[in-house]
Amino acid sequence: MLTRWLLSLDRSWKIGIAVALTVVIGLVVWQTEFRGPTPECKPVREMLDYNKAQAAQIESKIDKNGNGVPTIAEETAYRAWADGMAERAQKVTGDKVAANAVQLATLASQFASALDAYRIAAQGRAPGAPAPTEAYQLSAINAQITDQMKALTDACPAQRKLTDIF
């Protein structure tokens, strides 16, 4: 039925339909192939996406009544995150981003390790006492993690700009 209708159309309509289909197919290819991350950035985007997913998972494990002291479950979640970041960092081979990915994975591991020391120090504190020095160490590591994430995001945006392609 569709073919009979197409055959009955005027030649100019057939050309118009063919042009419209070509444009739609071209736009789909453009969005999927040319605007996505470069091959060098695909493992970086995977690492960044993993980090985002793990942040949500870790957030769900945080004990809201724990006075900021991490639980064993939180530490386990952070360790899994750090291990996953290390795995993904090994896949990043681009000259411009490999060092940042390795640094980010190293910082993630340091953060997960420092969390245990913070938990132990915080549990022995009296209410109202100043934060243990381990809290400042975690804050400093977190700031460095944020810097590395920004460097990787800037180097490998989720979608390339037209000027990056041409």
Image: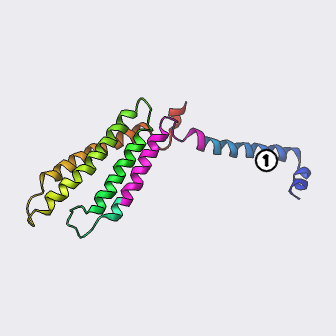
Q: Say which of 110 and 40 sits in front.
A: 110
Residue 44 vs residue 148: left or right? right
Residue 20 vs residue 101: left or right? right
Q: Is 19 above or below relative to 53?
A: above
Q: Is 43 above or below relative to 52?
A: above
Residue at the (76%, 42%) spot, across then down: 19
Q: Amino acid at mark 1?
A: Ile
| Element class at badge 1 | helix
Q: Is 17 above or below relative to 1?
A: above
Q: Could you tell me residue 126's position as x and y percent?
A: 8, 65
- Quarter of the image that includes the N terminus: bottom right
Please report the bounds of the magenta region as a residue range. Answer: 31-57
Name the residue beneath numbered marker 1: 17
Residue at the (12%, 51%) spot, across then down: 133
Which is the main secondary structure of the residues drawn in magenta? helix
**Magenta includes 36?**
yes
- Quarter of the image that includes the C terminus: top right
Q: Quadrant of residue 18?
A: top right
Residue 49 vs residue 78: left or right? right
Q: Could you tell me residue 140's position as x and y percent?
A: 21, 46
Q: Quadrant of residue 44?
A: top left
